[in-house]
Image (cartoon, rainbow, N blue to C red):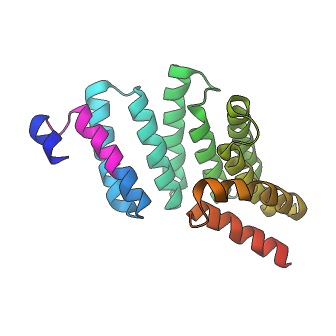
């Protein structure tokens, strides 16, 4: 990044783009606060230089929404995700593949808030779009179904939750690996459900 900053001003979109890449690396290392700072800086640069409705703004807002949700700042996450969704809808339409990340993230926000029907609706929308583009065996479809299984478990639909997790977890384990945090979460839920 230092090289880009030497050539470009700190507010240049290239520098902002590098910040978003570095933020993704930091997130993969669990360094959420550093990643969030970089993303907020990148967002300001994108907004100032290329405008409020650019795709880069939307993708950065989705990532910030995921971070806010993981920190249980659900109101902030919802605002970021709704803003991202408005940008995506304007650019690509309300049911474009770009919307999948927003639907999934919003589903996790609603799941965290205990709004089960709203969470289920968001996950189902993400699954429908992904399945229509890539087929029923795609890993993102499996991930969406696993999140839907969490909703089933919260609704005490244990048989549905267990069946859904057993059908979809192997795909995620092959795709993401058994050490992935989401895979571990789904595996733990399945273990708890089958213990009772």
> Residue 162 location, x and y as percent?
83, 63
Task: Report if residue 21 lies within the magenta region.
Answer: yes
Give the prevailing secondary structure in the magenta stretch.
helix
> Residue 153 location, x and y as percent?
80, 62
Total labels drawn: 0
> Residue 89 location, x and y as percent?
56, 24
Front one among 133 and 67: 133
**Residue drawn at 54 percent across, 33 percent down:** 85
In the displayed structure image, the side of residue 51 where residue 195 appears, left or right: right
Looking at the rendered image, the quarter that the C terminus falls into is bottom right
First to last magenta residue range: 9-22
In the displayed structure image, the side of residue 170 where residue 182 appears, left or right: left
In the displayed structure image, the side of residue 191 where residue 31 appears, left or right: left
Task: Report if residue 166 lies within the magenta region.
Answer: no
**Residue drawn at 39 percent across, 32 percent down:** 56
Residue located farthest toward the bottom when viewing the structure as drawn:
195
> Residue 8 location, x and y as percent?
14, 34
């Amino acid at each position: 990044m230092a090289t880009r900053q030497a050539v470009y001003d700190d507010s240049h979109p290239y520098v902002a783009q590098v910040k978003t890449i570095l933020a993704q690396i930091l997130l993969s290392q669990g360094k959420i606060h550093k990643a969030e700072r970089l993303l907020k800086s990148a967002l300001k640069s994108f907004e100032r230089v290329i405008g409020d409705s650019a795709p880069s703004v939307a993708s950065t807002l989705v990532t910030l929404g995921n971070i806010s949700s993981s920190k249980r700042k659900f109101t902030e996450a919802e605002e970021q995700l709704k803003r991202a969704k408005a940008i995506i809808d304007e650019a690509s339409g309300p049911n474009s593949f770009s919307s999948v990340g927003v639907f999934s993230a919003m589903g996790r926000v609603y799941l965290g808030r205990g709004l089960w029907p709203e969470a289920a609706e968001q996950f189902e929308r993400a699954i429908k779009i992904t399945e229509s583009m890539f087929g029923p065996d795609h890993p993102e479809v499996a991930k969406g179904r696993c999140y839907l299984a969490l909703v089933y478990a919260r609704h005490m639909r244990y048989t549905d939750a267990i069946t859904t997790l057993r059908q979809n977890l192997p795909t995620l384990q092959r795709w993401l690996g058994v050490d992935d945090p989401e895979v571990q979460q789904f595996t733990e839920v399945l273990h708890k459900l089958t213990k009772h």
